[in-house]
Structures are given as C-alpha cells and as structure tokens.
Image (cartoon, rainbow, N blue to C red):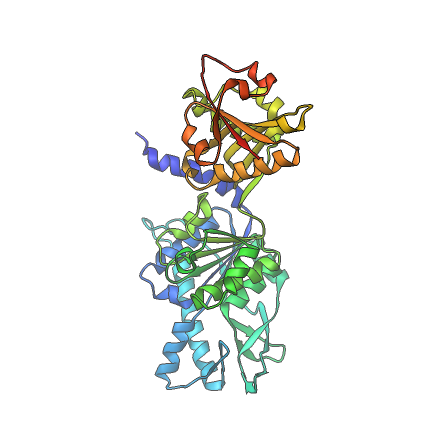
Amino acid sequence: MSDQPFVKLLRDAAPYVHAHHGRSFVVAFGGEAALSPHFADLLYDIALLRSLGVRLVLVHGARPQIESRLEKADVDTQISHGLRVTDSAALACVKEGVGSLRLDIEALLSSGLAGTPMGGARLDVAGGNLVTAKPVGVRNGIDHQYTGEVRSIDVEAVEDLLSRGSVVLLSPIGYSKSGETFNLRAEDVAVAVAEAINADKLLFLHDGDSLQQRLDCNAQLTLDEASRLASQTPVVDAPAQELLRYAVQACSRNIPRVHLVNHGEDGALLQELYSRDGAGTLVSRKAFDQLRQAQVDDIVGIQNLIEPLQADGALIERGHERLELELPNFLVMERDGLITACCALFPYNSTDDETAMGELACVAVHPDYRKQGRAEQLLDQVERQARGMGLRKLFALTTHTAHWFVEHHFNPAEVNDLPERRRAHYSQQRNAKIFIKPL
C-alpha cells in the first residue's frame, strides 16, 4: 500500500524537478551555517540538487572560523565601513579558517555510506584559482592591504567543470596576477559568479528568522520593492537589509530570481526550490504572481478552478468550447505556471452611455490561495478595464457569495435592472441574486 502523502509530495515536486534540470544555480552560505548541528543535512540537501540535475556552484563564507583563529593568534584587526583590514598576520588566519572549512565541506560532500542521504552518491567537487581579485586599496585614508574585491571569474573553467557534472566550490579567496592572495566577501563572489555564468538562480542561505518576519515584508518581492526595503531608514535590521542589497544587486545584473532562505530551518532549501510557495523570500525581476489576460494554454487551469464550483452550483456550466469562445473576456492570476484565480468581464454596451454595463462573472480562487486578496485584485483590474470601455456600472449574479459583493460596495438589484440581453438569459430556476456597483 503506497504512502499517499509521500506520493502527493513527489508528484507536486515533479514540475520543479523538470524545470530545474540542467539549470545553473549558485548557492551561497556563510561560515555560520557550518556551526549548525544541521550542517551535514544542509550539504546533503545541496548534494541532492546535483542528483536532480542542477548545475551547482557553491560559495562558502568563513567569518566565524576566521574570527576564531584571529582570537587564538591574538591578532587584532580593524573593521572599516564593513570591511576587515587584512594585514599579513590576519591573512594567515584567513587562510587557515577558509582552508579548514573548505576541507570539511569537501569531506561531507564526499560521503556515500549506505543508509544515509548520500548513499550511492558520487559527487565530484572541484575548485581552484577561478576568482581573480584586486586590492580594495586605500578607503577613507585606511589601507586595507590584503582585503580584496572580485576582478573577474574564469567563466570558461567554471563552465567546463559544470559541463562535466562537477559541483564547483568557491571560497572567499581570490588571487591576483602578481601572485598575491586576497580576502574577499563571499557575497561578492556569489554575485560575481552568478552574473558571469548567467545563473538561473542565486540562493543566499542566511541565519535567523525569515526576512518576512525581520522586515515585515511579503515572501515575494519585486526588484523595486526589495530596493525600497533595502534602503529604508531608520535601519530596521541591518544584516537583513544588507542581504537584500545583495539580492537587488544580483537582480540588477540580470539574475532572474534570488532566494533568501534560512539555513537553520531543516529542509527549507528543498522546500524553497521544489514547492510552489517555498520557504524563504524571493526577489525577482518581475512579479511572482502575475495578473494578465487569459491565453489558450490557460483553459485547462481555468477549468480546474471552476469545475468544483460548477459541481457545487456556485457557477454556471462552462465547457471547453464555451471557455475557448469566451477566453478574450477572462483575466487570470498565475503563480509559477499554476492558475490561482480567474474572472471574466462581459460588456453590455448601450446607445445610452449612462446605461452601459459590464458583468463580472466566473470569479474563482484556488482553495490554497483564498483569503489572500486575489479576488480583490481581480475586481480592481476588472473595474479599471470596465471604465476604459466606457461602462458606467458593473453587475454580478451569485448564489453563494452575496456577502462578498456587499462588502465590496455592490448594491442589491432586481432582474429588471439588468441589460435587456442579459435579462433574457436570466435563469429563474437558478434564482441567482443580483448586485450592481456604480463605477
């Protein structure tokens, strides 16, 4: 007997398995993640992405590991404008901290014991001198010495490794053409490599609660919304806003989607990538939820929405052929390929402009997305379209949702208040209530 919840989860994830196969993702995480008791599980989840066909570049930070070695070596360093001043003594600690953590990551990604998530896996982890750096130099009168910034990424070498199925692992270290080693910010490396390889996604795995909680924001942000949050004053949560600034920077460099996910939440990475609503915060160049005119490919999605309501008597029957004919009148809301809501506007023009009316019909919202304002967004758009058509009133017929129309400023009306053509098709048997709203 099959485990039905498991089967459903697997089937729900299947579209994302297909969509992500062969895509290039950059996953960045700080050294704080390595201190978590769930670090091994996180790396196993990352390894699973490769098994599912994702081309992976991993970028790790090492701040706490470096801080630990600086403390042990009794090396004092200065932080200037968010950047560590790295002298030769500090650089030795940077090399130790970064190198040690990198070896730990490679070891975990190399495991393959039966009975573990890595059972049967054979990952090739590769890296090298793929990041060329240059010194930050003197800023505000302070020489940052071996603190650097990304100059370039060896794109050809990275692409070659990815094409061979390797997981590319990059550390926050760069090398100059003169043979010097520089301490880099892992976030800068992640954005630079994502841009260089035209990554489909960049994922920042962060500490603490979700950004929705920390910044009181939505789980999906457009580039403009993220920009405003990142620069808002007074500062609400400096680390969260800094992370958003990196997301904005990446999106501005043509990375379509940047995901910000709490690495401490077990399984959050997989949930973010293989479920429709995810587990983190998404910053995208265009809105995640799209409200648009219906297209031919949407007919099945619309049918899936309205068929349960038709069976319940809330909506009148609309077969495939009728939907195809009426499709130009439909609006839909789409989330990652799923039609989450729909409605239709049917204009009834008149020789008398004052009596020109439109019918709001077939309002339906997916059960998983109700009470999230989708019907209200559709209504707002319908009203704008109706005004653009010169319509003066909007009417609706309903058997189940009279209160919703009253709450949205529709007034009760009678059959005789309908346009003559619509009046002729009013079903006395269905006995729907009529509501009209002035525009």
**Relative to 145, is 267 above or below?**
above
Name the residue: 48% across, 30% down. Answer: 411
Residue 174 in which image quadrant: bottom right
Question: Is 176 in front, or is 79?
Answer: 79
Q: Position of residue 389 (x, y in %)?
A: 66, 33
322 vs 243, left or right, is: right
Name which residue lies at 58% across and 20% down.
Answer: 322
54 left or right, relative to 400: right
Q: Considering the image in quadrants, where does the C terminus appear? A: top right
The quadrant the N terminus occupies is top left
Dividing the picture into quadrants, the one containing residue 366 is: top left
Q: Position of residue 210 (x, y in %)?
A: 40, 57
- Direction top: furthest residue: 429
Residue at image location 42% in from the left, 66% down from the top: 237
Please tell me how many numbered marks the rendered image carries: 0
- Please, which residue is most extreme toward the right here? 351
Q: Is any part of residue 356 visible from this angle?
A: no
Whether residue 358 is visible, yes or no, is yes
Question: Can you say whether 117 is above or below 176 in the image?
Answer: above
Which residue is more in the foreground, 389 or 26?
Answer: 389
In this view, the residue in front, 233 or 93, is 233
As drawn, 123 above or below 172? above
The front one of 340 and 427 is 427
Residue 305: x %, y % from top left: 47, 29
Residue 67 at x, y percent in the picture: 39, 77
